[in-house]
Each structure stands twice: as structure tokens, then as C-alpha cells.
Image (spheres, rainbow, N blue to C red):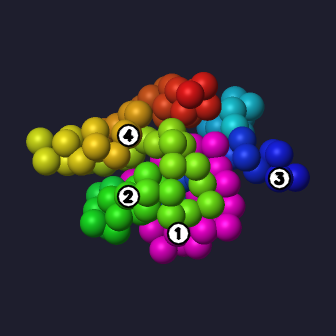
Amino acid sequence: MSERRNQDILLVEPSSLTGSIIVATARQLNLPAVRQVNSVRMAQQRLAHQDFAAVIVSIDEQQQEAIALLEQVRNDALAISASVPVAVITAQVDASTAIKMKALQVRRVLIKPFKVRDVIATITLLKDT
């Protein structure tokens, strides 16, 4: 079971609708399993004890907490590898956010509203890195 879990991707997305679309799409296309949590706090609890192959974090509603979570990941403060591939979901990116994302080694930024094919491409990118 733990070997399978290591292939899973953690999705931190407050919107149940958006999250369920991403989870279902990954399942239908036989992509790595996407496990959704609705808050940064829930993500911290999962990542404290469980490894994931990648993380996708929505940063709009809890931006400071989401950034802090990514910093914890990169500082090797959780059970997940500090070099794990990371993507973020956001409605917009300004210059300061772009600088933070680069510093946190974010591999891809999905801008809302995004197309399902963008999510598929993101999951594939994270899986292959």
C-alpha cells in the first residue's frame, strides 16, 4: 500500500467542485491518484506523516498559509521530500508572487479558470519529474 501512496499527488484545493473534477479526471485517465484536502491545515497534517509524489496547492484563499506550507516542504520540515515537484493554482500572478514561486521551485502555475487539459498536463509533468 505504501508503494502506491508514494505515487499519489496531494491536491490542496478549498473548492470541492474543482477538486472533484481534478480527482475524477486523473482517475479516468489512469494518471497517478490525486488525493484532495480542503485546507492548508489538513495538508500539513497529511504531509507530516505521509509521502506524496507531488503537491498541487491552490494559493488564492489562504495565500500566506499556502506559501508557508510550500516553505515547510522546501525546508524538509515534513515527511515529504524537500525536492518534491510542486504546482500551484491561482487566479492571478503578480511580480512578487512570481518571485516567491520561483524561489519555492514551483514547476507549474495553473491560472484560473483553467482547462482540464492543463490539469492533465500538470499532473503528467509532476509525475515525470
Q: Are marks 3 and 2 in contact (CB under 8 Å)?
A: no
Residue 64 seen from this side: yes
Q: Is residue 7 left or right of residue 82?
A: right
The quadrant of the image that shows the C terminus is top right
113 or 4: nearer the viewer: 4
Q: Residues within 10 Å of mark 3 (few under 14, many from 20)?
A: few
Query: Residue at the location (69% across, 46% down)?
Result: 8
Q: Residue at x 65, y 37 (%)?
A: 26
Q: Residues within 10 Å of mark 2 (few under 14, many from 20)?
A: some
Say what secondary structure mark 4 lies in. Answer: strand
**Among the 4 quarters of the image, the one containing residue 111:** top left
Which residue corresponds to mark 2?
A: 71
Q: What residue is shown with label 4? A: 106
Q: Which of the two discs, 2 and 4, labels the residue nearer the N terminus?
A: 2
C-alpha distance separating marks 3 and 2? 25 Å
Residue on which disc 3 sits: 2
Amino acid type at circle 3 is Ser
Query: Gap in Å between the C-alphas at discs 3 and 1?
Result: 19 Å
Lower position in the chain sequence, tag 3 or tag 2: 3
Query: Mark 3: which secondary structure?
Result: helix
Disc 2 to disc 4, how far (Cα)?
11 Å
Task: Tell me the kind of residue under disc 2.
Answer: Glu
Q: Which residues are magenta?
A: 35-58
In x, y percent, where is residue 22?
56, 44
> Within 10 angstroms of label 4, few (less than 14), some, or many (20 or more) residues?
some
The label number, if any, that marks residue 44 in the structure image: 1
